[in-house]
Amino acid sequence: MDSVELLQKLVQIPSPNPPGDTVDIANFIAESMRNIGCDVRMPAPDEKPEAINVVATLGDGAPVIMLHAHIDTVPIADSEASKWSVDPYAAVVKDGALYGKGSIDDKAPLASMMLTMIEASKQETLNGTLVLVAAAEEEVGGQLGTKWMAENGHLPECDFIVVGEQTANKVATAHKGVMRCTVTTTGKSVHATNPNRGINAISAMAKIVLALEGYHNELAKRVHPIVGFPTCNVGVIQGGSTANAVPDTCVIKIDRRMIPREIPEVVQSELRHVVESVDVNPAQATVDQWIFSSWFDSPLDSDLSQAFLQSVRDILDDEPGPIGYLPGSDAKHLMDLAKGDMIIFGPGSYEVAHAFDEHVRLDDYQATTDILLDFVKKTIYK
Ligand SMILES: [Zn+2]
């Protein structure tokens, strides 16, 4: 099977999440890796046994290099289905690109990593360990995928980790984290003929929304060199039921992006402070329903990092970065296993992911494979 056929095969095995059933694609990857002599494990959590992961290992000893890609994709949304110019699961090749759901996110990086494993398996022995992790559940946050594997002893500590995502073959070393919460204002509903008898929860919330906008503007002063500044966005507002009554509740949902090194507890108390310092009296305001996912960042000071950067320079004749990666990734769940550096790396842009006519340029995909292979040859070939 050549590299294009391998990627086609992966795209032709649908793995949308939800529902997140990765049995078929995991079986295909596991069999391919067993055929080249890997030790293959297929861990899956009891809570979701159909979300099967694959962990395939070649060689032993240090350094331990992990190649990680996710095997689930987003589903095809109703709004997008009619816009595809090709069958999203046919893996059509045209004009130098391969089209399909999951083609770039994340099956091209996965295929490049599998090809690297296949090449490395041709060596009689390796001077280290190469671990391919094909992870389920990334598209829904990774709680039952990479996070579960990392916390339950299914993944080794690593000297270097490559998380495959769309970085245009640049080396990404940081992404933001997310803090979400819900704010509710409570007032008193009366007939709109005499609003002064009631307490308007929407008016109270309006003041809070403006305060949050001020907070967002303040955050622009905290610049991270790679991922920019933190942000605060009010994404949802709901309140009232009819124009002729004073509304007694209003709810907003907040999305606060954290830059690396921001402490979640501090961010939480900042948000509370912004809300609580608005005078909404006699209405009441409460903050709850916190959801948190971590940022990630990594220095690039190890020899392995320098070797990777050099592989990018050699293959692409271009500066490798570092850059930031705007969407989140499973890297955040691997921080405790990364004894050395961790990077996010892969072909193309996340902007063509999660959309109709998702595709990967074949030359970009080839470059990803060439770079991974060059790096592995330099570092763990005897
Ligand atoms: Zn992805």
Image (cartoon, rainbow, N blue to C red):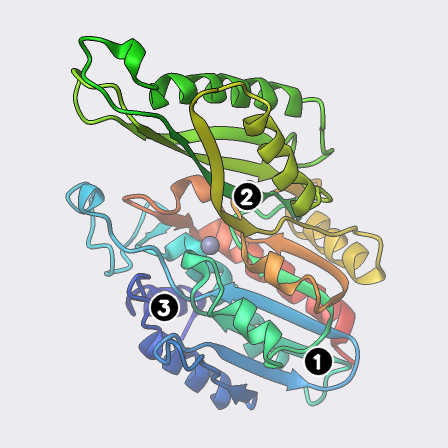
Label 2 lies in ligand 1 vicinity (Cβ under 8 Å) = no
Closer to the observer: label 3 or label 2?
2
Q: Residue 218's x, y, as percent?
A: 65, 20
Horizontally, residue 332 falls left or right of residue 284, namely right
Q: Quick check: marks 3 and 1 in contact, CB under 8 Å?
A: no
Q: Quick check: marks 3 and 2 in contact, CB under 8 Å?
A: no
- Label 2: few (<14), some (14–19) or many (≥20) C-alpha neighbours in 10 Å: some
Closer to the observer: label 1 or label 2?
2
At label 3, the amino acid type is Leu
Mark with earlier residue (3, 1)? 3
Image quadrant holding the C terminus, namely: bottom right
Q: Residue 316's x, y, as percent?
A: 64, 47
Q: Residue 127's x, y, as percent?
A: 78, 81
At label 1, the amino acid type is Thr
Determine the secondary structure under disc 2.
Answer: strand
Q: Residue 126's x, y, as percent?
A: 73, 83
Q: Which mark is residue 129?
A: 1
- Label 3: few (<14), some (14–19) or many (≥20) C-alpha neighbours in 10 Å: many
Q: Which mark is residue 179?
A: 2
Q: Is residue 126 visible?
A: yes
Image quadrant holding the N terminus, namely: bottom left
Mark with earlier residue (1, 2)? 1
**Image point 44% across, 80% down: which residue?**
44
Q: Quadrant of residue 178?
A: top right
How far apart are the alpha carbons under marks 3 and 1?
Answer: 25 Å
Q: Is residue 36 visible?
A: no
**Image point 49% across, 38% down: which residue?**
287
Q: Which mark is residue 10?
A: 3
**Image point 58% across, 71% down: which residue?**
116
